[in-house]
Image (spheres, rainbow, N blue to C red):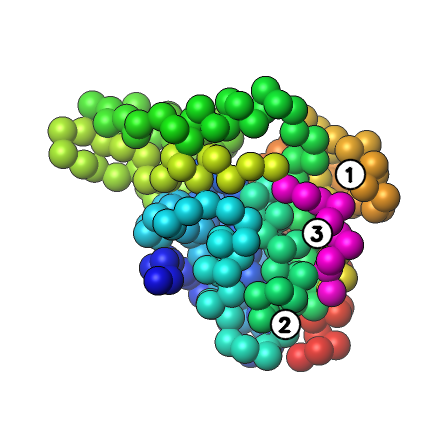
């Protein structure tokens, strides 16, 4: 049974741009880029909350394949699609680019994908996934918790936080389904080998989760965004213009 997804959309025609947020975040993180899309993307665009995030319903299980399958249902068959994803969203962009899910992906960009996972990294993620959701007494406490979980602390804006928290019986909670943190480590070499579309990897110059040398170890030539960190798309949406230009070229050729 398909998960009910919350999706914003805009623009007209082909190619379609699919913007995918990272683990714990919501589609609201793309608001700054959306404001620039009339100049940067001459087609339509879709911004979902991933299953179990924001205003989307939880998934039955969380794996890269099940999440990609849910997202595939958002795109009309046969229409050319370019996918720009951050962190987990970047892994899903590469997963969709495999062609295994029936989406006509012609270009995919993974921004800030964590390449190297230690046993300790995976253990901590599994512990978060197994932890019961907390109900906090105030909105501010829930907002602070969500910002930490999503990696957006210090980048707060009201519209970003609103989709990440909700009032519940006796207090406030974060909206992300904590089981999503158990999605695991991606097989990036395998996804790159399977890609049937042009693939681009990128990261902020100061991203501690995705250093340039880790990306280069995958035998790719990444785009490094100067002076930006892990959430480059939030810190400076305008800095993503070169990524969109690179994505648009193959997408336009198939439109």
Label 3 neighbourhood size at 10 Å, few (<14), some (14-19), many (20+)? some
Name the residue at 14% across, 34% down: 169
The reply to whether the magenta stretch includes residue 3 is: no
Camera-near label (3 vs 1) is 3
Label 1 neighbourhood size at 10 Å, few (<14), some (14-19), many (20+)? many
Q: Are marks 3 and 1 in contact (CB under 8 Å)?
A: no
Name the residue at 80% across, 44% down: 222
Residue 45 seen in the current view: yes
Q: Which residue is mark 2?
A: 104
Name the residue at 68% across, 43% down: 187
Magenta region: 186-196
Report the label total. 3
Q: Position of residue 153 (x, y in %)?
A: 47, 27
Cα distance, mark 2 to mark 1?
A: 25 Å
Q: Which residue is mark 3?
A: 191
Q: Which residue is mark 1?
A: 215
| Quadrant that contains the N terminus | bottom left
Question: Which sits earlier in the primary sequence, circle 2 or circle 1?
Answer: 2
Return the mark for residue 75. Answer: none
| Quadrant that contains the C terminus | bottom right
The reply to whether the magenta stretch includes residue 192 is: yes
Residue nearer the viewer, 65 or 203: 65
Q: Position of residue 125 (x, y in %)?
A: 50, 28
For mark 1, give the secondary structure: helix
Q: Are marks 2 and 1 in contact (CB under 8 Å)?
A: no
């Amino acid at each position: 049974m398909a998960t009910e997804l919350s999706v914003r959309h805009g623009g007209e025609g082909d190619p379609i741009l699919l913007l995918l947020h990272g683990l714990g975040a919501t589609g609201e993180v793309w608001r700054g880029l959306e404001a620039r899309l009339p100049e940067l993307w001459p087609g339509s665009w879709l911004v979902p909350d991933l299953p179990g995030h924001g205003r989307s319903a939880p998934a039955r299980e969380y794996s890269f394949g099940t999440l990609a399958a849910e997202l595939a249902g958002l795109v009309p068959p046969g229409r050319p699609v370019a996918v720009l994803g951050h962190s987990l969203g970047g892994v899903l962009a590469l997963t969709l680019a495999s062609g295994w899910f029936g989406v006509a992906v012609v270009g995919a960009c993974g921004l800030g994908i964590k390449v190297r996972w230690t046993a300790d990294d995976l253990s901590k993620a599994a512990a978060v996934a197994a932890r019961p959701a907390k109900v906090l007494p105030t909105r501010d406490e829930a907002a602070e918790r969500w910002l930490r979980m999503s990696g957006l602390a210090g980048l707060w804006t009201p519209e970003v936080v609103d989709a990440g928290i909700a009032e519940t019986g006796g207090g406030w909670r974060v909206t992300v389904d904590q089981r999503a943190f158990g999605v695991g480590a991606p097989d990036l070499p395998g996804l790159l080998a399977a890609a049937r579309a042009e693939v681009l990897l990128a990261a902020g110059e100061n991203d501690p989760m995705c250093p340039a040398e880790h990306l280069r170890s995958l035998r790719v030539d990444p785009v490094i965004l100067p002076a930006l960190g892990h959430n480059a798309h939030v810190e400076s949406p305008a800095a993503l213009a070169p990524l969109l230009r690179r994505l648009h070229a193959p997408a336009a050729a198939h439109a």
